[in-house]
Amino acid sequence: MEMTCPSDRSACDGLAEDADGNIYFSAYEQMALVKRSPDGNLHTLIRSPFLGRTDGMFVTSDGWRYVTLGQWNRLAGFNGEKI
């Protein structure tokens, strides 16, 4: 189910484009992946705390979307030197 994007100015990190001209980006403040269609419409594809800080993104020729997840918040320096 697609939902309206929470903001057209979401902070993002990872970006990818498919063969149809759709742009996919992470909206890490909302823990979401967003699609921007060529007509400019934004749709949230997924929102999940498991996404955390989506760092990179790739779209295959058959439409699969892959993301890498940065887990910097789990480093000891951000957690009182504990992992």
Image (spheres, rainbow, N blue to C red):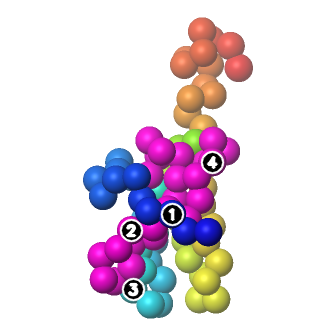
What is the three-letter code of the residue carrying label 4?
A: Ser
Q: CA distance from mark 2 to mark 3?
A: 13 Å
Which residue does the numbered mark 1 point to in the structure image? 3
- Tag 2 residue: 42
Asked if residue 41 is among those painted magenta in the image, a careful observer would answer yes
Label 1 Cα crowd, 10 Å radius (few <14 / some 14-19 / many 20+): few
Residue 70, how many percent across, how many down?
Answer: 57, 44
Q: Earlier in the sequence, mark 2 or mark 3?
A: 3
Write the start and end of the magenta stretch as one range.
27-51
Residue 34, percent across and down? 47, 63
Camera-side mark, 4 or 3? 4
- Evaluate if marks 4 and 2 touch, with contact meaning CB atoms under 8 Å apart: no
Q: Is residue 81 visible?
A: yes
Give the left or right position of residue 7, taking residue 19 as reference.
Answer: left
**Structural distance between the alpha carbons of marks 2 and 1:** 9 Å
Q: Residues within 10 Å of mark 3 (few under 14, many from 20)?
A: few
Q: Which residue is mark 4?
A: 48
The correct choice, above or below, for 13 with respect to 62 in the image is above
**Of the two numbered discs 4 and 1 in the rendering, the one whose residue sits closer to the viewer:** 1
Quarter-wise, where is residue 16 in the image? Answer: bottom left
Residue contact at pointers 4 and 3, CB within 8 angstroms: no
Q: Considering the numbered disc 2 on the image, is that residue within a helix, a strand or a loop?
A: strand
